[in-house]
Image (spheres, helix red, strand yellow):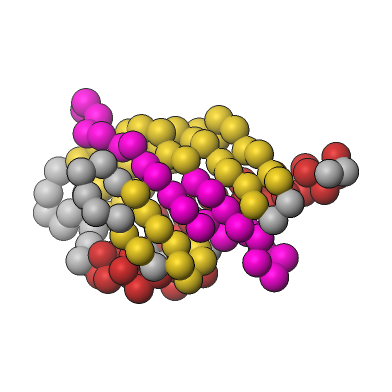
């Protein structure tokens, strides 16, 4: 892969992550859904796999009124044609209405696919655990 193309792909993936975080913070579910493939799969510790955009959207509706603020520290991005992976360390504060924030932190490994020239999350495995205050 040409160096300029590799840099452009890496930047596009970084931009996707920042867009995801900003849209999540703003409660913009429609933007978040556009950043994933139709057949996305999310893996979380102790839970069954969450399969597809519809399942993700349903889970998010249960968080109505909850503030979610996250930061990603990208550790590695590798691109191979139309498939890429990104490893980052994520810290998240989830604040339900009228309650104290619950903080979680951990590593996340995401597999992305380029579809119609646009990178999207295809598989995502997060190892977030409750973080000390």
59 and 70: which is toward the camera: 59
Q: Is residue 44 left or right of residue 20?
A: left
Count of marks, rendered view: 0
Res 126 → quadrant: top left
Magenta residue span: 110-133
Residue 112 part of the magenta segment: yes
Task: Measuring from the top left, give residue 3's x and y in whole percent.
Answer: 85, 40
Res 100 → quadrant: top left
Q: Quadrant of the C terminus?
A: top left
12 and 124: which is toward the camera: 124
90 and 77: which is toward the camera: 77
Task: Measuring from the top left, give residue 111's x and y in whole percent.
Answer: 53, 49
- Taking the spot 44% from the left edge, 62% from the top edge, the residue there is 40
Q: Point out the residue furthest to the top here.
A: 132
- Taking the spot 66% from the left edge, 39% from the top edge, the residue there is 78
Res 51 → quadrant: bottom left
Task: Measuring from the top left, give residue 24's x and y in whole percent.
Answer: 40, 58
Q: Quadrant of the N terminus?
A: top right
Q: Is residue 32 above or below residue 106?
A: below
């Amino acid at each position: 892969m040409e160096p300029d193309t590799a840099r452009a792909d890496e930047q596009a993936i970084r931009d996707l992550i920042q867009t995801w975080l900003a849209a999540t913070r703003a409660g913009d579910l429609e933007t978040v859904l556009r950043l994933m493939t139709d057949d996305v799969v999310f893996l979380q510790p102790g839970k069954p796999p969450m399969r597809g955009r519809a399942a993700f959207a349903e889970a998010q509706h249960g968080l109505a009124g909850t503030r979610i603020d996250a930061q990603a520290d990208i550790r590695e991005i590798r691109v191979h044609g139309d498939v890429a992976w990104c490893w980052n360390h994520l810290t998240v504060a989830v604040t339900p209405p009228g309650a104290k924030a619950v903080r979680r932190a951990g590593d996340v490994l995401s597999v992305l696919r380029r579809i119609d020239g646009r990178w999207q999350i295809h598989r995502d495995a997060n190892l977030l655990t409750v973080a000390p205050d």
